Image: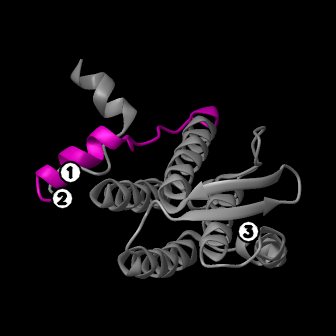
Amino acid sequence: MVHSVLTMYKYHIWANEVILNRLKELPQDVFHKEVNSGFSSAAKTMCHIYLTDLAWLEIISGTSMSDAMAYTNQLTEQMETKNIEEMKVVFTELSKRYKKYLNDQTNYEKVIEVDNPYAGLLETTIFETILHLVTHGSYHRGNIATMLRQIGHTSVMQDFGLFLYSNLMGGAHNQSLTMEDVNNQR
C-alpha cells in the first residue's frame, strides 16, 4: 500500500509538470486565454488544482476543512495571476511539503475525520485523500486538454501508463508527446 500511495502521488506531480511544460511551449497568451469551459482559462484551472491540493494537505495535517477552504480562498486571486514559471514554483514547493508529509507517515490507512461544510462528516484515509487528489487533478488536466483543442492547439499525453513507461525508461521517454504525435504514428 505504501508503494501505491507514493507512486500515485508521484504520477500527480509528473502529470502537473507535463501539462505545465506543454503550456510553456505554446504562445504566452494561451495560459490566461479565456475559453468557454468550467474554469475559464488554463491558468484558473491549474490554480484550482493547486489550491485544492493545498487545502487537502492542510486538512490531512489537522486543519479543519472550513479553515483550509478559507485559507485557500484568500489565495485565489493572487494565484490566478501567476505565469507558468511562477505556477511551476508553487507546485514544486507544495510537492516537497506533500513528500515530507507522506514520508513521515507510518499508516496511510489512518482514519481522518473531515467535516465538510457542504456535505457533512466524512471518515476517510490518507490513501483515499491521495487518490482523490490524483483523480481530481486528472479530471481538470483533461479540461485543459479540451481548452487547448478549442483554441487550435494540441495537448500532451499525461496518462498513468505513460508515467509508468517514463519511469521504466529512466525518465527518458518523451514527456511532451502530443496527441498529434500519437495520431501521426497510427
Up-down relation of residue 119 to residue 57 (above or below): above
Residue at (85, 74) in percent of width and height: 70
Position of residue 159 in the picture relative to residue 109 (left or right): left
The stretch of residues the image draws in magenta is 149-171
35 to the left or right of 177 = right
What residue did someone put label 2 on? 171
The residue lying toward the viewer, choosing from 117 and 79, is: 117
Which secondary structure, mark 3?
Answer: helix
Alpha carbons under labels 3 and 2: distance apart: 30 Å
Residue at image point 60% right, 78% down: 61
Which of the numbered marks, if any, corresponds to residue 80?
A: 3
Where the N terminus falls, by quadrant?
Answer: bottom left
The answer to whether residue 77 is left or right of residue 110 is right
Whole-angstrom CA distance, mark 1 to mark 2, is: 5 Å
Give how far across and how far down residue 50 sits, in percent: 62, 66
Q: Quadrant of the C terminus?
A: top left
Residue 182 horizontal/vertical position (percent) = 29, 29
